[in-house]
Image (tube, helix red, strand yellow):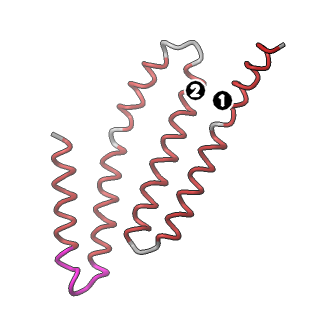
Amino acid sequence: MEFMKVGALALLGVLVGIFFQNGKQEYGLYTGMGICLLIFTYTISYMGQVKEQLSQLFSYLSSGSRYFSLLFRVAGIAWVCEFVAGICRDSGFSAVASQVELFGKIMILFSGMPVFLTLMETISDFVR
């Protein structure tokens, strides 16, 4: 049911944006950005529930708490970068959107580096 609310809000925003497409185009752009921010904040309200369910899932794992924060950080970086890049691309700044996506990928790589190093240590222990 919540998806229907978000879908209706998005459809309303697109219709208002189309209405302003012929006249004041900047109003259409502002409307699109506003709708994106509303949907983003609406989605963030569900992140608490997701965090609770994931923490319950990771409680069954022995070292789950250590990787839980990493997983949540990587998901947040990917989500925010995709959101910002989408707004930049819709505004006509595709070069800026590409740079935001590149920055997000590099941040995810560096955030996941401790897991990679732990994996390499484990492999080297097996080899010895």
- Identified at 46% across, 52% down, the residue is 80
The numbered mark, 2 or 1, whose residue comes first in the sequence reads: 2
Kindly state the secondary structure of the residue where label 1 is placed. helix
Q: Disc 2 to disc 1, how far (Cα)?
A: 8 Å
Q: Which residues are magenta?
A: 18-27
- Depth check, front residue: 31 or 96: 96
Q: Nearer the viewer, mark 2 or mark 1?
A: 1
Provide the residue designation for mark 2.
Answer: 67
Q: Is disc 1 surrounded by few (<14), some (14 to 19) or many (20+) residues within 10 Å? A: some
Residue sitting nearer the eye, 93 or 127 = 127
**Quadrant in the picture for residue 122:** top right
Q: Nearer the viewer, residue 25 or 46?
A: 25
**Residue placed under numbered mark 1 in the picture:** 115
Q: Amino acid at mark 2?
A: Tyr
Residue 61 — which label? none
- Could you tell whether 107 is left or right of 117 in the image? left
The x and y percentages for residue 66 are: 60, 24
Picture coordinates of residue 17, whole percent (x, y):
22, 72
Q: Residue at x 59, y 17 (%)?
A: 63
* Picture residue at 74% right of the left edge, 26% below the top: 120
Q: Are marks 2 and 1 in contact (CB under 8 Å)?
A: yes
